[in-house]
Image (cartoon, helix red, strand yellow):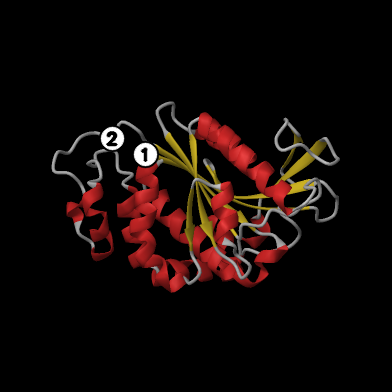
């Protein structure tokens, strides 16, 4: 256990009980093994093409041009002309959070969750002008009402190779995990940074404190609205065997369905469009 932070209900959605909840933050150092390092390196090598395309789409270099949205469709074929001809220093650096649902409902989908997390991490980490946080979350493992955050990468603390062996268990108290990620981004972001959180989830909040499924959706929606007012944009990547698109759309302004990892290269254009619109 790395740290414990108290979370209060804060008026978000209204709790059925447990007005004071705990958040336990873990560092996955035990997963930094030679086997996982080799597995991680293999994932990066096999997906170098999509990592490069995503890196281009996110346009995080400090001397890059503005995206020409009319040419976004050319990203998958590697056409650098998606950027406008007038090159100027980008006023807003990026501060990005990658937050993965690691609850029990994701059991059959953790391979794709791990893969998407690594691809996004690798596309972003190479930029000196981007601040990055990567975490997963679960809840109610040993103690009811406890949200568990695992930090794979936060500025100055690199446990990224452990992402090769992400595991799923327990429940998911999404709005608490999202709030924690937002707080962390605010800690590491530069004053002028554009802040974005990518949520990898199956669209199903479920944990103690939620009266029912609709209540969980409401708690997430209200948290998203609050963060939007604070200048933090959220893009949901829907994965999993039980994904329901209408749930994602009810919680998030921007969402993308990733039902087949083989389709991810084709989704780079959509991801770029979502980023441009935030």
The quadrant where residue 169 appears = bottom right
Q: Is residue 206 above or below residue 234?
A: below
Q: Gap in Å between the C-alphas at discs 2 and 1?
A: 10 Å
Badge 2: residue crowd in 10 Å (few <14, some 14–19, many ≥20): some
Q: x and y percent of residue 47 in the render?
A: 40, 68
Secondary structure category for the residue under label 2:
loop
State the mark number for residue 90: 2
Badge 1: residue crowd in 10 Å (few <14, some 14–19, many ≥20): some
- Locate residue 117 relative to residue 192 in the image: left or right: right
- Locate residue 72 relative to residue 159 in the image: left or right: left
Q: Is residue 84 visible?
A: yes
In the picture of the structure, the residue carrying the numbered disc 1 is 129
Q: Give me the residue at 67% from left, 69% from top.
A: 107
Q: Residue furthest left?
A: 85
Query: 213 and 141: which one is in front?
Result: 213
Secondary structure category for the residue under label 1:
loop
Q: Is residue 191 above or below residue 206?
A: above
Q: Give me the residue at 64% from left, 72% from top.
A: 108
Disc 2 to disc 1: CB gap under 8 Å:
yes
Q: x and y percent of residue 210 in the render?
A: 77, 47
- Locate residue 274 relative to residue 227 in the image: left or right: left
Query: 59 and 173: which one is in front?
Result: 173
């Amino acid at each position: 256990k790395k740290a414990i932070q108290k979370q209060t209900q804060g008026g978000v959605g209204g709790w059925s009980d447990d007005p004071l909840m705990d958040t336990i933050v873990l560092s996955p150092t035990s997963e930094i093994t030679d086997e996982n390092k080799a597995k991680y390196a293999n994932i990066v090598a096999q997906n170098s093409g999509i990592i490069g395309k995503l890196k281009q789409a996110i346009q995080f270099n400090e001397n890059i041009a503005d995206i020409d949205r009319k040419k976004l469709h050319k990203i998958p074929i590697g056409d650098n002309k998606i950027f406008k001809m007038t090159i100027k220093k980008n006023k807003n650096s990026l501060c990005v959070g990658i937050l993965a649902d690691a609850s029990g409902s994701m059991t059959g989908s953790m391979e794709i969750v791990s893969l998407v997390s690594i691809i996004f991490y690798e596309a972003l980490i190479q930029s000196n002008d981007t601040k990055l946080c990567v975490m997963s979350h679960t809840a109610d493992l040993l103690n009811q009402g406890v949200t568990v955050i695992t930090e794979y990468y936060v500025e100055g603390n690199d446990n990224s190779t452990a992402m090769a062996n992400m595991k799923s268990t327990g429940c998911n108290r999404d709005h608490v995990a999202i709030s924690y990620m937002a707080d962390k981004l605010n800690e590491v972001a530069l004053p002028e940074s554009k802040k974005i959180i990518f949520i990898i989830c199956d669209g199903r909040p479920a944990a103690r404190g939620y009266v029912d499924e609709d209540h969980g959706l409401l708690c997430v929606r209200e948290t998203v609205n609050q963060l939007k007012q604070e200048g933090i944009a959220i893009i949901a990547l829907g994965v999993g065997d039980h994904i329901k698109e209408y749930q994602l759309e009810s919680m998030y302004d921007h969402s993308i369905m990733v039902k087949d990892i083989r389709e991810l290269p084709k989704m780079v254009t959509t991801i770029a469009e979502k980023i441009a619109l935030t």
